[in-house]
Amino acid sequence: MRKLFVRSLAGAALIVGAGSAALAQGALDFSGAPLSGDLPLGHAPGDPTYDMPAGQRLISAFGERPVFSPDGTKVAFIGHSYGDAFEYDLKTRKIRNLTAHMPHRGFLRVHYLNDGSFLLLGPHDPATTMAETRDKRIEVFWLDRAATGSAVPLRITLFEGLATSRYSNRIAWTENVPKGADSKDVKGSLLKTAEVVVAGSTARLANVREVSTITECRTEAQDFLPGDKGVTMPCYNFDPAFKGGARTQVMSIDLASGAVTKYPTPPELYGEIEGIFPDGRHSLVECSGDRSAGMDLCVLELKAAAPRYTRITQIMDYGRWKYGNPVVSPNGRMIAAQVGSADVVDVGMGLGIVLIDVPAGFPKPGS
């Protein structure tokens, strides 16, 4: 039996155990054990973009930033940064290009709305550098569910990604404060929500609402909490003095009151919140001691007092590799993520899309 002990760091609990060495290299671990804050790099032979552990499979040898369709039967993703959007059918295993039929300047993200249509995130007018484009020029476009029409601009310029509701065409996003500022001059983030109203071959925003401004960091809307009562967000502080150039917190905002809840992150851990589980009490997290060296996937218990972080993947056994942008299927039984090298020229870049089977009963209540 694996012996476990819990140590508390800055109000967050790390589950640490002696059994981690017994795992096969790169293996999945849904036991609720071990996470060490530094997540050291290993030297295992092999290529983790092809050498998949049991319970995991590569569905595309290219791609990044996957998302599940509302019914869980498809996975949409971006082929490469500033490229086309694609869709993988889990039943037929066929991939279709969603955006090759129309001219565009390239996309960084694709999302499904609750009605099955798409939102595409990319520049209308790119800046001179990728960094400036990502920071100041990313807009949101609507595309019909058949992916045959033109991309309709929704006139949103946002920071990073957005959250989409499981119940309606409601979305949430953040904008830099002040709007249009250079990265070094950004003072915070403004969270907004709206409804995407679809009418035939076009769409528009309605009920646009400013929720709250966060000034202690830059935030990104990630997922709606159950009942659309709140939004989870990573809270970024960028500083070259930090290991990997950034430090993160995990927080959520109540959409009615604007109240902020923080879920403490151990000081030695880079923990960036990603896809939420259907129970609304657990979320996937990109976790690492140094995000520039590699990242694995962890599960965070969403509670403000001593939340628990547990590690489920071991890609860093192979060295400078990472999983990124993980999401959970609507039924909670699959995780989709990108796999790739830590040595990339821009954030969010991947070398393929993987599916990870989630065992029944995971995550357990109270874990």
Image (cartoon, rainbow, N blue to C red):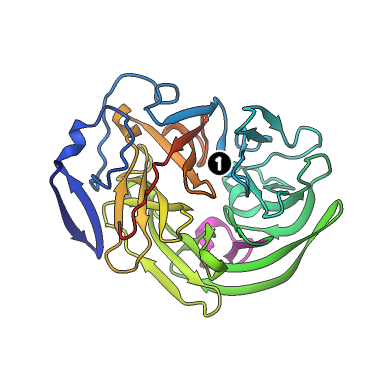
* Residue placed most toward the observer, 221 or 148: 148
Residue at image coords 61%, 63%: 172
Label 1 neighbour load within 10 Å: few <14, some 14-19, many 20+: many
The image position of residue 241, as x and y in percent, is 33, 52
The image position of residue 205, as x and y in percent, is 75, 64
The image position of residue 39, as x and y in percent, is 26, 41
Where residue 303 sits, quadrant-wise, is bottom left
Residue at image coords 38%, 62%: 302
- Describe residue 18's horizontal placement relative to residue 75 as left or right: left
- Type of residue at label 1? Arg
* Residue placed most toward the observer, 89 or 291: 89
* Residue placed most toward the observer, 280 or 105: 280
Instruction: Look at the image and give the residue range highlighted in magenta.
Output: 170-188
Q: Residue furthest bottom?
A: 257
- Describe residue 272's horizontal placement relative to residue 13 as left or right: right
Give the quarter of the figure containing the N terminus: top left
**SS for tag 1?**
strand
Q: Which residue is mark 1?
A: 65
Where residue 34 sits, quadrant-wise, is top left
The image position of residue 127, as x and y in percent, is 67, 46
Question: Is residue 285 positioned above or below 213 on the image?
Answer: above
